[in-house]
Amino acid sequence: MKSPLLSSDPIHVLRQEFRGHLEQFYAHLNLAPPYHSIEKAVQHLSNTLRTKPEEFRQGLLQDATNKWALFQEIFSASGLQKKHRGIIQQLTLSSYSIASSESLRFLRNFADGPPTNHSRTGR
C-alpha cells in the first residue's frame, strides 16, 4: 500500500503542474495572476480528469502533447483567456518570444483567437 504522502495520484500531479504553468505564465508576462480564476481553472481540470478513465490520466503523465492539449483546452474553457485579454493580445502581436518558457504556450490561446481591431490586415 502506498503512503498518502507519496501518492502518485495523476489528478493531483496534473493539478499541481497546471497551476505551476499558469503561475509561470503570468509571472513571465509581469502580470498579477487572477488567483480566483486560476483556482477555478484548476478545479475545472480536476473535474474533467475525474470523468476520464485511469489509463487516460496515467497516460497524460507520460504524453506531453496530449497533456498540453488538455491544458490549453482547460485554459480556454475556464475563461482564463478573457483575463488581461487586451494586454496579452498586444504581447502576442509583438515580437514576444514564446520560446522563453514552456508556460508561454498559453499565449497561443490569444494569438489564435478571433481578430481584433489591433490585428493586421491580410495585405
Image: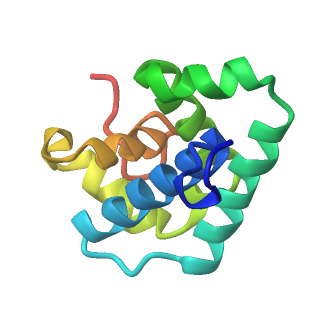
Image quadrant where one finds the N terminus: top right
Q: Nearer the viewer, residue 63 or 9?
A: 9
Residue at the right extreme of this rendering: 51
Q: Is residue 57 left or right of residue 88?
A: right
Residue depicted at x 31% and y 38%: 120
Drawn side of residue 76 relative to residue 108, left or right: right
Above-or-below relation of 88 to 33: above
* Nearest to the observer: residue 72 or residue 14: 14
Residue 54 image-quadrant placement: top right
Q: Is residue 43 left or right of residue 112?
A: right
Depicted 12 relative to depicted 49: above or below: below
Q: Is residue 105 left or right of 66 when viewed as pictured?
A: left
Q: Position of residue 61 (x, y in %)?
A: 50, 29
Q: Quadrant of residue 123?
A: top left
Residue 94: horizontal and vertical position, in percent? 19, 50
Question: Residue 114: in sight, yes or no?
Answer: no
- The residue depicted at 52 percent of the width and 39 percent of the height is 113
List x then y, in percent, for residue 77.
70, 46
Front-most of residues 39 and 75? 39
Look at the image and tell me whether residue 59 can be seen: yes
- Res 21 quadrant in image: bottom left
Q: Residue at x 27, y 42 (%)?
A: 102
